[in-house]
Image (spheres, rainbow, N blue to C red):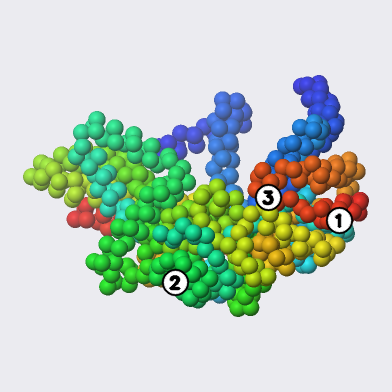
Amino acid sequence: MKRIAGIFLVALVVASVASAQALLINGAGATFPNPIYSKWFDEYHKNNGNIQINYQSVGSGAGIKQVTDGTVDFGASDGPMNDEQLKAFQEKHGFGILHFPTVLGAVVPMYNIPGVTAALDFTPEALAGIFLGKITKWNDPAIAGANKGVNLPGNDIVVVHRSDGSGTTYVWTDYLSKVSEEWKNKVGKGTSVNWPVGLGGKGNEGVTGQIKNAPNSIGYVELIYAVSNNIPYGNVKNSSGSFIKADLASVSEAAAAAAKTMPDDFRVSITDPAGKKAYPIASFTWLLIPAKFSDAAKRDTMKGFLNWMLADGQNYAEQLSYAKLPKEVIAKEKKALSSIQ
Amino acid sequence: MAATTSVPSASPISGSRSFVRRLREGDEVARLITFLFAVSVVLVTLLLIFALWQGSALARHKFGLQFFFTRVWDPIAEQFGALPFIYGTLMTATVSLVIAVPLGIGAAIFLAELASARLSDALEFFIDLLAAVPSVIYGLLGVFIVVPLMRDYVQPGLKATLGFLPLFSGPAYGVGFLTAGIVLAIMVIPYIISVSREVLMSVPRDQREAALGLGSTRWESTWKVVVPFARTGIMGSIFLALARALGETMAVTMVIGNTPTISASLFSPGYTIAAVIANEFTEATGDLYLQALVELGLVLFLLTFLLNGLARLLIVITSQRGSGTAHA
């Protein structure tokens, strides 16, 4: 009996030494970039057989929490960590955490008005008014004024929002907070907020379903959901006064405008940006990488992956409907990479 | 009961040698192992309460009892109150039982007493199948069939006929308390039917024969003798259904509208405790937010606990009254 146990123990030790050769890195966080992250980690594993990166798309909040607790090697989030969270990480580990933008996504107002197939034009005031519950009819002058020639019905607007906490909600409310003082004071921005009006749908697909189902409804979803479901979504007026349709070009434009003023820690919101052709409701999504690794092999692997992501990895973005990073941002990130110890 | 316990208690006379033998034979081992299994249930329950209590310390201190009476749920301002969620949970469970109890018991009576054995067994197969369907499937049924039906036909119809009642007022979104209650009812009916049917079928034959012998009709014997005899078991089936309705998450969140409102109207969108936890837990940033969600879990536990206690009490009271009338 003892001998069997002994053999078993030896086998276990051998096995664990052998598996240490194949490097395993664990990450967790945002669901929004999950399609491209899965693609990246898969491709990277194909090119580097001994490296396996596991990613759980558990949500930005959980990603921040898990990387702070130290249960995963890196996190991912659709909204940058706030000062409080950064401080909590610093206090727990004795070193900081770095943000690395990976790709960009856009959030669009999607609607279902029987008889209206045209792409509506939305002013920031109209969007804020609708989601504050102050604009309740589709033929309200705030909406109709920007859409002359479209026959808008006098029906009540059904507002649909996300019921689950989400980076999409963060981007949407971040935008509304910037364009509406009242929104900022009454509701604010976050992954979940206290909605003044509306129905909640779970996930992008839940919101899409509600909008498809309910006539005269409006909601917000990630661009790809509106495109793939063939439901009309509106153009939004940007800070230069033009109505912009969300697509990869107009989102990249928004990023380019932000690239020049990118802060060193990359924690930047690019909603309501300056560019003339920029779509105003877009955002980076970030990987959260600890500034120090106790395991040198892990550190080098992580750096290797980030370098690949900033170069070859970017080529996978557009086929999955994410916008690529602007060149200036990539250059800046490469510089920041060297500070990981 | 007394007879069975006296058998093992007779053996210790032969002392420790016999204990070893009994150990070999497996009696004591079996006893010990099954005892551990039984205790583990209690341990898990205690652990659950402890984890929920521990995990919500911050929120409990910050909000105190006020948590139960606050209507605001604002993650940005970190103001959390459970009232709309408690209301939504109780409301949807009530609607579902109001629909499911008469339907379920009616069907069970038919299957147990009136239908032929072959028909009864065939239908029972389908009922068991329904009970095993995952709740997300019921949610899809709700989203694709019940919600459009409610919005286009049922709610406008109710509004036109019973619209003067506050219960049936307000805009018809399709989603809301009523729809969630109906989907829940569809989910819990199989439980009520299945358990009630078994209970009704186990009523001794002589009860029926005695009633028939006294000159009662088939229905009279069923309604006045068999059903009252099986009352405790039927109650049990209803409380099983209630427990499922209170805790159901997926199907409810898909059709309730997910808005923390307290409204007398059944058409209004609402929210339940289980649904809000499932929706917001993953993205809950900040300790207080997370802990408020854990405290909601504690509240749901408490609610289930209270209702279960109430159920036990009800069963005790009615079964006493039942035996009283039987003697009289």
Looking at the image, residue A177 lies above or below residue A232:
below
Residue under mark 2: which chain is it in?
A: A
Foreground: A261 or A305? A261
Residue A188 x/y as whole percent: 63, 72
Q: Which mark, by number, is residue A139?
A: 2
**Local crowd at mark 2 within 10 Å, few (<14), some, or many (≥20)?**
some
> Which comes before the other along the chain, label 3 or label 2?
2
Question: Distance from label 3 to label 2 (Cα)?
Answer: 34 Å
**Callout 2: SS:** loop
Which amino acid type is marked by label 3?
Tyr
Foreground: B265 or B161? B161
Residue B158 x/y as whole percent: 28, 63
- Do residues under tags 3 and 2 come within 8 Å of each other at their CB atoms? no
Residue A307 x/y as whole percent: 84, 45
Q: Quadrant of residue B56?
A: bottom right
Mark 1 vs mark 2: give the one in front. Answer: 2
Left or right placement of residue A28 versus residue A156 in this view: right
Looking at the image, residue A197 lies above or below residue A330:
below
**Local crowd at mark 1 within 10 Å, few (<14), some, or many (≥20)?**
some
Q: Are marks 1 and 2 on the same chain?
A: yes
Q: Quadrant of residue A268?
A: bottom right
**Local crowd at mark 3 within 10 Å, few (<14), some, or many (≥20)?**
many
Residue under mark 1: which chain is it in?
A: A
Q: Residue at x 60, y 55 (%)?
A: A222
Q: Which mark, by number, is residue A332?
A: 1
**Callout 1: SS:** helix
Which amino acid type is marked by label 2?
Asn
Q: Are marks 1 and 3 on the same chain?
A: yes
Question: Which residue is denoted by mark 3 in the rendering?
Answer: A322
Left or right placement of residue B291 versus residue B1 in this view: right
> Which comes before the other along the chain, label 1 or label 2?
2
